[in-house]
Image (tube, rainbow, N blue to C red):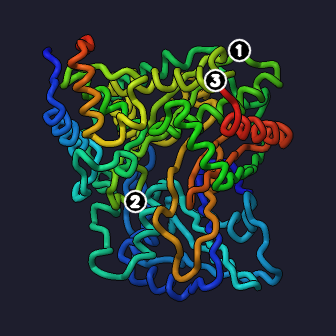
Amino acid sequence: MRRVGLPGNVCCAVIKLGKGFDVEQLRRRIAGSPVMDWLARAQIFRPLPMIFPPLWRASGKPQAILFEHNTKNGTPDIAGVLPPEVAQRELHASRGPGLAFDVMRHADGTSHLFLSWNHTHLDARGLDFLLNHLNGEPSAKNVPSVENFINPKQLGWDLAGWWPNVKQARGSLKWLHESGKEPLFSLLPVGRRPAQCRNNHRVIYFTAEETGRIDARCQQFNCGFRRSHFYLAASLRGLHSVAVQRGNQDGAYLIPVPHDTRKRGAKGPIFSNHLSILFYRIEPKFAGRIGDILGELSRQMTDQIRDRFPESCMAALDMFKPLPLGYYVHHLGKPTRGKIATFSFSDSGETCAGMKELWGGPIQEVTHLVPSWRPPGLTIIFLRFNNRLSALISSVDDCLKPAEVDGMEQDMRRALLEETG
Amino acid sequence: MTPEQDPKIIAAKLCEFARTNFVAEGVQFDENSPLSQAGIDSFALVELVLFCERVLGVRVPDSHLTGTNLASMSSLADCIAELARNGQPPA
């Protein structure tokens, strides 16, 4: 389990590979890839702390990013629990490297590949592009262009472009002030934060048959193109049941949902985060029924896109990036007094799309383990691999008890597979 | 604004909007491309619906955003043209 906090902002893709995986192939591809060379050396730095914006640079010498381990007994069940070698690896954005491959080879010939990355370096879609690049033929055609390494805005200071961001950001900040009105539901216990908090992970796997049923239910709810709304509605149902059990069902739910701003079908950019955010505020009177939640999500999403909220939100993020981190955290949390999110939610979509094997090993399972921040103390991520859906419930140990996670899992399953209306 | 009623013109405008705003350069995309395979998600769908309101002058109600109407830009254009002909109030 990773500890909670900024250095712990490390995600991990756990990929289970069958017999035939050749680690030497992976080593050669890493060594021959200009993208990997850059990523292994990339660091974020502040020339003068608190005054100038952070910038990216590539350090002189690339650092080790591929590590091998062996287990003696069969294939351990790793779902949701990282081995200590992986969990204790710190990947600092400022010191680099920002990502690492841990290969765990098992006695039965199968392997687990743990791809850990600092969220400052990549988002989940960027990781998918990187895997596609490394798994492809080492030809000139398969080398992403320089623009795919880094967002040009982060290469140098663009102080002239900062002021227009301030003006465009006003809309989203105003929205946050208005939507952050109490009462808001929070998982955070009253009192001081414990000295050390830990993340717990629960992975809910759905079979291909169950995934087919969930897809059919999306169609029933007229969510064919809005599957992520259906997943979000089911997650909120699960959390609402926790709120009801705690006797605290008067607070509204504030949910930021990241939106990938890359064009559909694009092969990059790989590096950095390319996300905007939509914010939903769901009142508790709507949170009890899937149909009601979907109606609210649809209405609020349309209103926000009509008001150009995502563009304003991106401008706000660009505006805050050059500021000292403490100020950023303070100001972003201020409109909602730290309750900027009741929980974090993301739908990563299809992971490893079109890939059957990685470096000779057939892909058997893919899981994303992401950190949860405190606040809010809960992150829910959905992903699909090979026509099978899975959901990760990542929680901070003092915010959600194991029995409450059990209840959420049952409620989410019921909402996704059975509940009508 | 007089709503556009010719499905071919509507489909061409929808494709142009999609190519400009959310389909990557070099991706094969025309009025018959299946929208489900073009990576159209909820966000892109809402952008399309708002484009219909703003530029084509037709409001597409949620009830018309069915799998059949959203099969391709061509089928969506047919739906919009029908809404325009039936006197759908301008957006």
Mark 2–mark 1 distance (CA, rounded to whole Å)? 41 Å
Tell me the crowding category of disc 2: few under 14, some 14 to 19, or many 20 or more residues within 10 angstroms, Cα based. many
Q: Which mark is residue A2?
A: none
Q: Earlier in the sequence, mark 2 or mark 3?
A: 2
Image vertical order of residue A228 relative to residue A67, above or below: above
Q: Amino acid at mark 3?
A: Gly
Name the residue carrying label 3.
A421
Quadrant placement of the C terminus of chain A = top right
Q: CA distance from mark 3 to mark 1?
A: 22 Å
Judge from the rendering whether residue B78 lies leftward or rightward of residue A21; answer left or right: left
Which of marks 1 and 2 precedes in the sequence? 1
Tell which tag, 2 or 3, sits nearer the viewer: 3
The reply to whether residue A253 is in sight is yes
- Rounded to the nearest angstrom, the CA distance separating label 2 from label 3 is 41 Å
The kind of residue tagged 1 is Asp
Name the disc covering residue A271, or none: 2
Image position, residue B87 (x, y; %): 23, 12
Provide the secondary structure element on which disc 3 rests: loop
Of the 4 image quadrants, the one containing the N terminus of chain A is bottom right
Q: Quadrant of residue A138?
A: bottom left
Q: Residue furthest bottom?
A: A24
The picture quadrant where one finds residue A333 is top right
Which kind of residue does numbered mark 2 sit on? Phe
Residue topped by disc 1: A250
Asked if the residue at tag 3 contacts the one at tag 2, i.e. Cβ–Cβ closer than 8 Å, the answer is no
Q: Earlier in the sequence, mark 3 or mark 1?
A: 1
**Residue at image point 74% right, 68% down:** A83
How far across and how far down the image is residue A380, in percent? 63, 43
**Residue under the point 30% across and 26% down:** B50
